[in-house]
Image (spheres, helix red, strand yellow):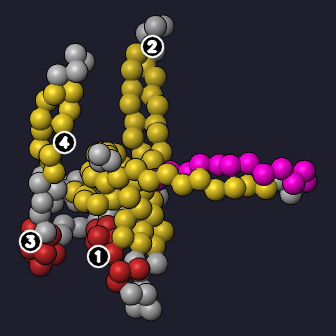
Amino acid sequence: MNIVTLCGYLGNHWEDNINTETKEEEWFARNTLAISKAWINKKGQRVEQTSWIPVVVFGKNAKTAVNYTTKGSGFLLSGELITEVYKVTNETTGEVKNKQSWQVVIKQFDLKASNNKKPMDTEVQEEYKDKEKEIEITYCDKNGKEIPQQIQPV
């Protein structure tokens, strides 16, 4: 099962191809999601670490994300992790190396964060209500015992 659930803040403005010349099924939007954690180290100092997760969303969801969120918006998503292998050739030596990239393909997301551009209008909310599905994810505690939980997307 390949399900990723992340909560963070959008690191940039969306890079997208949404326009009248592109078909809706070809629309996409890319961004990065900043996920931070903080802890106290052995010296008693507060340490913070931020991970930048590349994300992409397609179709009508891409248009919704672009229209209602911007850099710094809180963002909760559910999707799947995709990896790709590609070759890079060193121009000087001609050496070819395999490289790997990854990103999260967003399937569903939540726009309820208080710092988003504007609240969704009723028409858009109704459109997404009709598409609601439940995803069941099984979590395990530290002893390996399953803890069933449910996430209900917007």
Judging depth in this view, the residue of 29 and 146 nearest the camera is 146
- Disc 1 vs disc 4: Cβ atoms closer than 8 Å? no
Give the residues in magenta. 92-103
Say whether marks 4 and 2 touch (CB < 8 Å).
no
Q: Which mark is residue 48?
A: none
Q: Earlier in the sequence, mark 3 or mark 2?
A: 2
- The residue lying furthest to the right in this view is 92
Label 2 secondary element: loop
Q: Residue at x 44, y 53 (%)?
A: 82
Q: Which residue is mark 4?
A: 137
Q: Is residue 145 above or below residue 34?
A: above
Query: What amino acid does circle 1 point to?
Result: Lys
| Nearest to viewer (mark 4 / mark 2) | 4
Using residue 132 as the reference point, say whether residue 113 is left or right of it: right
Residue under pointer 2: 41
Q: Position of residue 14 (x, y in %)?
A: 44, 66
Q: Position of residue 153 (x, y in %)?
A: 16, 56
* Label located before the other in sequence (4 or 3): 3
Mark sitting earlier along the chain (1/2): 2
Residue 128 visible somewhere in the drawing: yes
Residue type indicated by callout 4: Ile
Residue 34: image quadrant is top left
Of the image marks 4 and 2, the number of the one nearer the N terminus: 2
Going from N to C along the chain, the mark reached first, 1 or 4, is 1
Of the pair 113 and 23, the residue shown nearer to us: 23
Closer to us: mark 1 or mark 4?
4
Q: Disc 3, disc 2: CB below 8 Å? A: no
Give the image location of residue 49, x and y in percent: 46, 31
